[in-house]
Image (tube, rainbow, N blue to C red):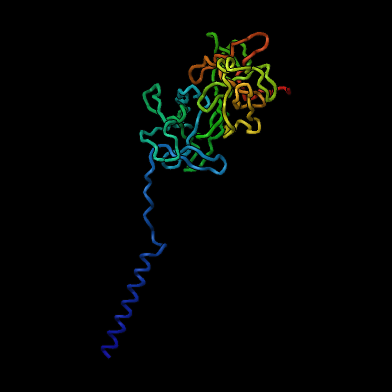
Amino acid sequence: MLIYLKKNLLAVLSIAMVITACKKNSSDEPTTPPVNNNKGIQLATDAKFGSVLTDKDGKTLYFFASDAAGVPTCTGGCETAWPLYYSADASTDLNLNKAEVGEVTRTDGRKQSTYRGYPLYYYAGDATAGQIKGDGVGGTWFVAKPDYSLMLANAQLFGNNTNYTSTYAVGTGNTIYLTDSKGRTLYAFAPDKNGVNTYTKSTTQEGIWPVYESEVLSVPSAVAKADVGVITVATISKKQLTYKGWPLYYWISDVKRGDNLGIVIGKGPGLTWPVLQLNATVAPAP
């Protein structure tokens, strides 16, 4: 009888040990979250915006159109809604072009990370990683992306030591206009037609007003992608991006990002080389 009880007791203990072990291995038990080894700027994929820039924890980063010249202009109270982003760490994201990452020192001495020369910001309205609530705010804030074909500048027009308004009258006030993905100003040629470059006759003209070569990849949400196209300029065998049918050009003397000195070239009764404003009319039919 004693032997029988001992055998039963051992069986009960064995079952208890198995149950305990199963409980310890159960998925119901809390597990240690994986360690985040990300550093610096990262790339994330969003269902609406595609590839976007984030910090190491997945918080979305933004560009400000007023920073087209590469100088941070969101200061003071603006920083409450748009805190600056800075990381001294090199990005660990293997899909990110590290050559496009940089930093700028603000007037108060603080450093701010940049991508393609644009200072990077957070949006205070994004409570959690993955949220993108700041895109399009004020028509000047856009989610930071690595693949924009065009960007927008919100800046003063300036030429011949004179400030101009969006109507090209002498005066001060910012104008919203198109730039390339690195803040370089884009122009139209007034005699051009819809989808037709009438300026570039040879490499001579190309050397003065270079065509903007680009395929349509991605555009800021304020720009209708249907308004952007590509034409082939047969005289120089290059492709040229268009906006609302207007072929897009650089001005050779705009030596740094943010310059828009070409607006005064050929300025007379009708402006010959206007910047391409967001609200431009559609180019006339050929």
Which of the 4 image quarters holds residue 212?
Answer: top right
- Total count of labels: 0
> For the C terminus, which image quadrant?
top right
Answer yes or no: is residue 138 visible.
no
Which of the 4 image quarters holds residue 157?
Answer: top right
Answer yes or no: is residue 238 visible.
yes
Can you give x and y, in whole percent of width and height, for residue 284 in the image?
72, 22
Can you give x and y, in whole percent of width and height, for residue 253 in the image?
52, 14
Identify the residue shown where x is 55% and y is 23%.
Answer: 154
Which of the 4 image quarters holds residue 148?
Answer: top right
Relative to residue 176, is residue 80 drawn left or right?
A: left
Relative to residue 160, is residue 112 drawn left or right?
A: left
State the residue lying farthest toward the left: 2
Between residue 64 and residue 137, name the one nearer to us.
64
Relative to residue 50, is residue 37 drawn left or right?
A: left
State the residue lying farthest toward the bottom: 1
Can you give x and y, in whole percent of width and height, for residue 197 in the image?
65, 21
Can you give x and y, in whole percent of width and height, for residue 184 in the image?
52, 22
Identify the residue shown where x is 51% and y is 20%.
Answer: 258
Relative to residue 12, is residue 250 drawn left or right?
A: right
- Seen in the picture, residue 221 relative to 27 is either above or below; the reply is above
Identify the residue shown where x is 28% and y is 91%.
Answer: 1
